[in-house]
Amino acid sequence: MIIDELVTDRTQSDVDRVKELTLKWLDGSITAEEQTEWLAGLKGAYNYTDLNRVGQAVAYLANILNASGRSVNVTAKSDWTMTDIPSRSQETAFLRDLTLLKSGVTGDVPNVPSTLDGMTYEVANRIEQILIAVHDSINYERSNWEVSGIMICGTEGVL
């Protein structure tokens, strides 16, 4: 499940490793092992694979919320390529999607960043923590609805 693939444990050492390997790549001193590490994807870099993973998770969560009768209209772009650079409007839409998901649940969800300018590993972690918290909130609501008997009370559009 896409939620299980989210990354929330990036550290400064992950970022430092990206910088180290980038410099080695640029000056031609990178080893074959380091090239393999680079190509496998580095946690300290936020790139198209991260954007696609998050876009897939946004779409997944929006589908669950929409199936429950809530109206959550997200853009959830998940077809980024290696050469794509998000535009300001795409960044705005991305943050809007996170805000919509957060507003669609009642649980404790971290605050959505106000901007992606100067993205840090902490912001990258928080973005994916938001998605996990939305998922956890949906699951919590589901379990409480079942316990309270709402599912057998004739309610339409239940989770």
Image: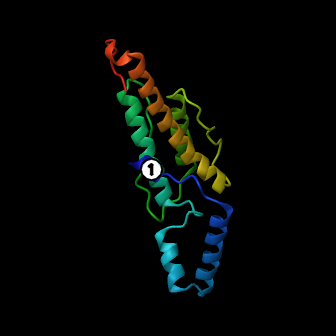
Do we see residue 69 in this rendering? yes
- Left or right of 91, for residue 148: left
SS at mark 1 in the image = helix
In x, y percent, where is residue 158? Answer: 36, 22
Query: Which quadrant, please, contains the C terminus?
Result: top left
Q: Residue furthest top?
A: 153
- Judged left or right of residue 26, residue 145 is left
- Decide: is 77 above or below 96: below
Q: Does 57 sit left or right of 122 as displayed?
A: left
Seen in the image, is 35 located left or right of residue 63?
Answer: right
Density class for disc 1 (Cα within 10 Å; few <14, some 14-19, many ≥20) is: few
Residue under the point 45% across and 37% down: 74
Q: Which residue position is annotated with label 1?
A: 4
Q: Residue at x 44, y 31 (%)?
A: 72
Where is 79 relative to 64, above or below? below
Residue 77 shows up from this direction? no
Q: Nearer the viewer, residue 132 or 47?
A: 132
Give the farthest residue toward the front. Answer: 147
Picture coordinates of residue 30, whole percent (x, y): 57, 84
Q: Say which amino acid is labelled 1.
A: Asp
Position of 127 relative to 15 (above/below): above
Q: Quadrant of residue 73?
A: top left
Q: Identify which residue is drawn at 44% across, 45% down.
A: 57
Colouring of the image: rainbow
Image spot of residue 126 (x, y percent): 61, 46
Position of 26 relative to 116 (above/below): below
- How many marks are shown on the rendered structure? 1
Residue for point 59% across, 87% down: 28
Q: Nearer the viewer, residue 25 or 4?
A: 4
Of residue 57 and residue 3, the one placed in the foreground of this image is 3
